[in-house]
Amino acid sequence: MSRKPIIAGNWKMNNTKSEAKALVEGILEGIKPLDKSKMPDVILAPTYTALWQVQDLIKDEPSIALGAQNVNPNKKGAYTGEISIDMLNDFSVKYIIIGHSERRQLFHESDEFINEKARAIIASNLIPIICCGETLEQREAGITDVHLASQITKAYNGISKDDALKTVVAYEPIWAIGTGKTCDAQEANRTIGEIRKVLTKLYDEDAASKIRILYGGSVKPSTIVEQMAQEEIDGGLIGGASLEAQSFVELIKGAM
Ligand code: PEP
């Protein structure tokens, strides 16, 4: 596999400043003995209030990049409670998670809004991590692939192949997020293969084979090795298991 793996920690609404500091220090300590040339791209996506501190703590560690959990696609203005790309740029954020199922479900974000975010992020030379995933009802109804094709097609609307190559996808079955139920590795591999077919249709095989696609949904140190052994899975977007330094370091090791 020529695609470089990614291990991304989505902290969600967790960690105060002091908790963030302790977590990052634990991760830095844990990766010290690792061969950096074999390490995956590691991304930490803290809450906005910890961005400054995490940026400072990782400044001498090139294998770790800063991520954000969301963004508003507008430049600036009357969007109370939102954050802009320029503001995230101030903290050297490189990756921005968009379309997470929690944003879609709890904050009613539409495919169109997610596409708007993707385009704005790319235009600012940052990298969107575009999440997609089906509910349990959709899986049981046998419409997972159709649903994912629709989400991906809408997310990439109006995005050129050159720009699509600057994106990352995260396949996150909603029923596996935060539930402890991991999607079977072979099934996650199959589903991600289907997402690549959609990207082939939208662009071509070259693009589909280069865009990194992560799996997310209760990834744990005990599941990562089998997941990373799958041809189509390029890494993990991790919630719960990214909140503890030792388990996050184990996940990094599992992707080496
Ligand atoms: C996530 O937040 O994207 C996620 C996959 O969470 P968890 O690993 O806790 O299921």
Image (cartoon, helix red, strand yellow):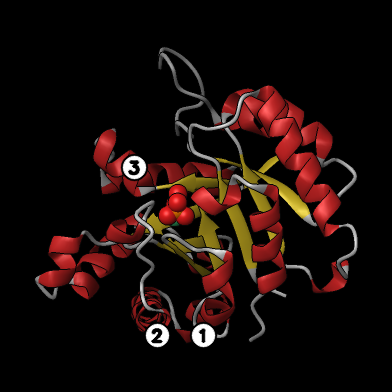
Q: Distance from label 2 to label 3 (Cα)?
A: 25 Å
> Regarding mark 2 in the picture, which secondary structure is present there?
helix
Q: Is residue 177 above or below residue 18?
A: below
Mark 3, Cα crowd under 10 Å, few <14 / some 14-19 / many 20+, is few
- Whether label 3 lies within 8 Å of ligand 1 gets the answer yes
Seen at 58% across and 61% down, the residue is 166
Residue type for callout 2: Gln
Earlier in the chain: of badge 1 and badge 3, it is 3
Disc number placed over residue 110 in the picture, else none: none
Disc number placed over residue 102 in the picture, else none: 3
Q: Is residue 85 above or below residue 222?
A: above
The picture places residue 237, in percent across and down from the top left corner, at 52, 58
Disc number placed over residue 186 in the picture, else none: 2
> Regarding mark 1 in the picture, which secondary structure is present there?
loop
Q: Which residue is mark 1?
A: 230
* Residue 158 visible to an observer of this rendering: no
In front of the other: 176 or 144: 176
* Residue 190 visible to an observer of this rendering: yes
Q: Are marks 1 and 3 in contact (CB under 8 Å)?
A: no
Mark 2, Cα crowd under 10 Å, few <14 / some 14-19 / many 20+, is some
Earlier in the chain: of badge 1 and badge 2, it is 2
Earlier in the chain: of badge 2 and badge 3, it is 3
The picture places residue 146, in percent across and down from the top left corner, at 19, 72
Residue depth check, mark 2 versus mark 3: number of the one nearer the observer: 2
